[in-house]
Image (cartoon, helix red, strand yellow):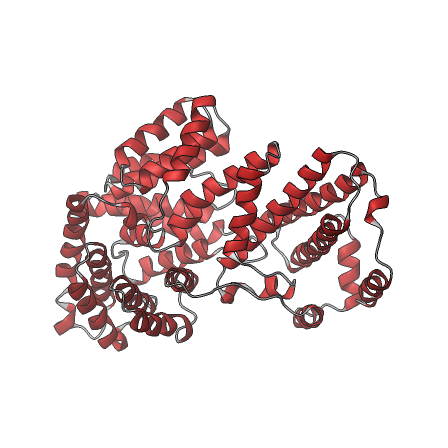
Amino acid sequence: MKNSFLENLSKWIVSPNYDKYTDVEVFAESYHAQHYAMLIALYAMETNSVFTLIKLAYHLRNLTRRYSELWQIRKRRQNWEDELARLYFEAHMRFANGLINIIISHTPPKFLKIMNFLGYKGSESIGLNEMNKVAFEMNAGFMSKIAQLALIYYWVYGKPHGENVPSDLSLCKQMIEAELKIYPKSMIYGLAKAKIEQIDGQIDRAIEILLELIEAPNLIIAYKAFYFELIWCYAIKLDWKKCIECAEKIRDSRHSPVCMTYLNAVFRYVEAIDTDDQSLLDQASKEFETLPSLRIRHFGKTMTTEKAALQNARLFFKKGKHLVLPVIAMLYCGNYLMFVRDQNHLEKIMDRIEREVERYKHQIENSAILDDYLTALFYKGVLLRLLKRYPNALECFEFILEHKNRIDLETSIVPMATLELGLVAMEMNNHPEAKKWLDHAEKDFAGYTAENFVHLKVYAAIRMMGENTDKKKANKNKFNKHIIQWLKFHGIDMKKYREIINDDRI
């Protein structure tokens, strides 16, 4: 820490003359920063202990310092040997700055502790301005193409799955079609086109494109992406047999075996219930049983989706081998229900939910616990909101809050119902009421399975109402203090910390 302070002090007293660097040396600094970024990605995938987590945090801090210096080079360097070199360097810096701003601006405060301590801030408008400049104005070759791709996937994945309503994708469609005219067999643009069809509610067309992509020779990871999207297309259509076929294709995932096995289990379960197939139900039970042994860690922690899958597997056995509308729950959490534009199909999904509501309605009079009934009622309320039957939706969510003391295991239902009350108010343009419920959902509940999901949805709704969610820069001294506190918590002294940092085997 002392060396770091002296380093910064010396740079403040004697600022480097960046004009003495050659263009090659400047780009060497740039590629060094990219090297740190790739190391971080690798450590993130491999982090399964406190020691590799320390290493990850160390590289992350080095990356922030490296980019701070690169930003100074961009601002202060006047003499470039080649104008193209200056253009490409500026494009790299703008792209990195844009990406960081977009990611952080969409991250709820609950998840921002590490980023804030690193001293980053995030503004969506700044991020999009930077990315758009690189993508459409600078003509910076490969970097412009990468920026365009980043924006396309931000529009077709980040926004639809992270926001509460679909975005206007007309510009994105034009970009994809233009690229497909040049590269008609492109896997990257083909997947984006299929995703747009899915978002627009053209599920059959999305399936057609994805099946064509599967027929073409591609990377293994590409096939997994295609089958993953096919799963959700068939799930929206309530075609469980096709879901099982696709889920089986991606079962052997190295990055999230829990989630992939959970998908296999859930689709087998719902098909078994619909067809009264005991052997299929037994298969689903075996799948649920294996989940705890498949858990892996990223960034030293189990992912939110895996935690939810493990919790639902435990609920399955605690409830006597049954779950309430598990596929509808996944479609809701992934925002896939929002992509159903056909009112008749929404009514078809509603019929399925209504059957579950009626199935468990007897609990109101005959049981002290209403978990199953209130879960089914919650998803009925969600469908009513999507059908814009707001008074009926409000009745469902208010009933859940009135009977919250009769919930035993399904602890996520009350905060999710609170969130939905805020979304209904927002869609009815009653922003003060919406803000009240959204604040309640964010601040007054903790420790439930869907907590991260609720926080993301709350944050998206707040942005949609026009409130500023930009993150301010954090105090670097506070960051250093936080590191020391964190190390003490894990029983690691500074000497051991430095040994870990210097050990390249980790």
Q: Is residue 278 above or below residue 450?
A: above
Percent x, y for residue 138? 60, 38
Q: Is residue 43 visible?
A: yes
List x then y, in percent, for residue 107: 50, 59
Residue 427, percent from left and from top: 27, 61
Identify the residue at horizontal 79%, vertical 67% (top origin): 1
Residue 228 in sight in this render: no
Give the residue displayed 15% in from the left and 49% down from the top.
Answer: 347
Marker count (numbered): 0
Q: Residue at x 42, y 74 (%)?
A: 443
The image position of residue 485, as x and y in percent, is 68, 73
329 relative to 311 in the view: left or right:
left
Taking depth in this image into account, of 213 and 63 the one nearest to the observer is 63
Q: Residue at x 38, y 48 (%)?
A: 160
Residue 231 appears left or right of 238: right
* 503 lies above or below 169: below
